[in-house]
Amino acid sequence: MIDQQLLLDGCAAFGITLPQGAAEKLDRYAQLLVEWNQKMNLTAITEPREIVYKHFVDSLAPLSLLGIDAFSGKRLIDVGT
């Protein structure tokens, strides 16, 4: 569904390297998000390119500012409004 290379490149622009398999898992999450959005209206963002940037890269970008490795075991939550 999503362009996984676009996701990896978007993260790399912020100095974030996703671990092996993460892009595939986020792709599956995007598929489920769009599927369930048809039933529950979860988000207005359903285009694959927008999902990459507005859901995934935007949520991961602050990690580079905080000096947190995306998958170091530390926890941070992005709570939408």
Image (cartoon, helix red, strand yellow):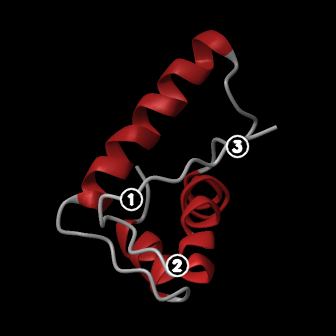
The picture places residue 78, in percent across and down from the top left corner, at 63, 49
- Contact between labelled residues 3 and 2, with CB atoms less than 8 Å apart: no
Residue type for callout 2: Gly
Camera-side residue of 41 and 69: 69
Upstream in the sequence, badge 1 or badge 3? 3
Mark 2 Cα-neighbour bin, 10 Å: few <14, some 14–19, many ≥20: many
Classify the position of the C terminus by image quarter: top right
Vertical comparison of 49 with 65: above or below: above
Residue type for callout 3: Ile
Could you say whether the residue bearing mark 3 is in a helix, strand or loop? loop
Camera-side residue of 8 and 72: 72
Could you say whether the residue bearing mark 1 is in a helix, strand or loop? loop
Residue type for callout 1: Lys
Q: Which residue is mark 1?
A: 74
Could you say whether the residue bearing mark 2 is in a helix, strand or loop? helix
The picture places residue 44, in percent across and down from the top left corner, at 76, 36
Mark on residue 43?
none
- Structural distance between the alpha carbons of marks 2 and 3: 17 Å
Upstream in the sequence, badge 2 or badge 3? 2
Q: Is residue 14 left or right of residue 78?
A: left
- Structural distance between the alpha carbons of marks 1 and 3: 28 Å
The picture places residue 38, in percent across and down from the top left corner, at 60, 18
Q: Residue furthest front?
A: 74
Q: Which residue is mark 2?
A: 10
Q: Which residue is mark 3?
A: 45
Viewer-side label of 1, 2: 1
Image quadrant in which you'd find residue 80: top right
User: What residue appears at the point 33 percent right and 41 percent down from the top-left corner?
Assistant: 28
Upstream in the sequence, badge 1 or badge 2? 2
User: What residue appears at the point 37 percent right and 50 percent down from the top-left corner?
Assistant: 26
